[in-house]
Image (tube, rainbow, N blue to C red):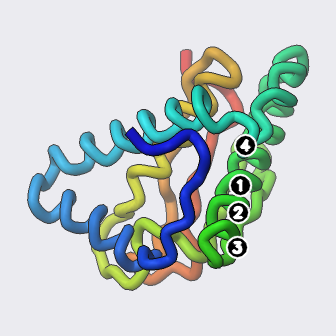
Amino acid sequence: YPPNEPVVINRLTFGDYASLCAGLLGFYGRAGKAMLLRIGRLSARHSIEQQGALFGLAALAAVRLLPTSSQLKIGLENVQGGLRKLSQAAGQDRRLHLEDRGDRFAFVVEDCTMCAGKQSDMPICMIMTGALQEMTHWLTGKEFEIRETECRGMGAPACVWEVVKKPKE
């Protein structure tokens, strides 16, 4: 298992990580998508259980009293903050922001590690989708529709995940 504290590995690049994701999709096809979603959920679970301070999770316990959309907003902002800290520890910057789009939030990653330098005819960043699914469920106890609507691998300027504010029935 990885150590509980982030380890700086300067040899790995965004492109290396993207090659891993693309390789799993290429080798396993549709099963690769499910595998990447599961990797994302398990990675988020590990972060919740072992690296909570990095993502500011202790402070999130108090937001459970807020309306669901406020919980989501604060939780998604904390995820982005944690991702920035991880990247900075490895000497890389991450450009992420959150947009309110009415009935959904847009989780925007301008320099996605999962598709860096790759080309695809469909969104390929399923690890982040799985991680966002796990994080929002942990925070609220509810399931939300989360899908990647734009992908740099498809030529978009950024990878964008839309998180519907209303939980699934």
**Front disc: 4 or 3:** 4
* 11 on left or right of 121: right
8 is higher (above) or lower (below) than 134: below
State which tag comes first along the sequence, 4 or 1: 4
- Picture residue at 76% right of the left edge, 54% below the top: 81
Mark 3 and mark 1 in contact? Answer it, CB < 8 Å.
Answer: no
State which tag comes first along the sequence, 3 or 1: 1
The residue that label 3 is drawn on is 95
State which tag comes first along the sequence, 4 or 3: 4
SS category of the residue bearing label 3 = loop
The residue that label 2 is drawn on is 84
The residue that label 4 is drawn on is 55
7 is higher (above) or lower (below) than 134: below
Mark 2 and mark 1 in contact? Answer it, CB < 8 Å.
Answer: yes
Where residue 5 sits in the image (x, y, percent)? 60, 46
Q: Count the marks: how many?
A: 4
- Picture residue at 78% right of the left edge, 49% below the top: 77
Where residue 135 sits in the image (x, y, percent)? 60, 33
Three-letter amino acid code of the residue under disc 2: Arg
State which tag comes first along the sequence, 2 or 4: 4
The N terminus, quarter of image: top left
Q: What's the distance in space between the residues labelled 4 and 1, CA to CA? A: 8 Å
Where residue 119 sits in the image (x, y, percent)? 31, 81
Mark 2, Cα crowd under 10 Å, few <14 / some 14-19 / many 20+, is some
The C terminus, quarter of image: top right
State which tag comes first along the sequence, 3 or 2: 2
Three-letter amino acid code of the residue under disc 3: Arg
Mark 3, Cα crowd under 10 Å, few <14 / some 14-19 / many 20+, is few
- Picture residue at 25% right of the left edge, 67% below the top: 22
- Picture residue at 29% right of the left edge, 72% below the top: 19
Mark 1, Cα crowd under 10 Å, few <14 / some 14-19 / many 20+, is many
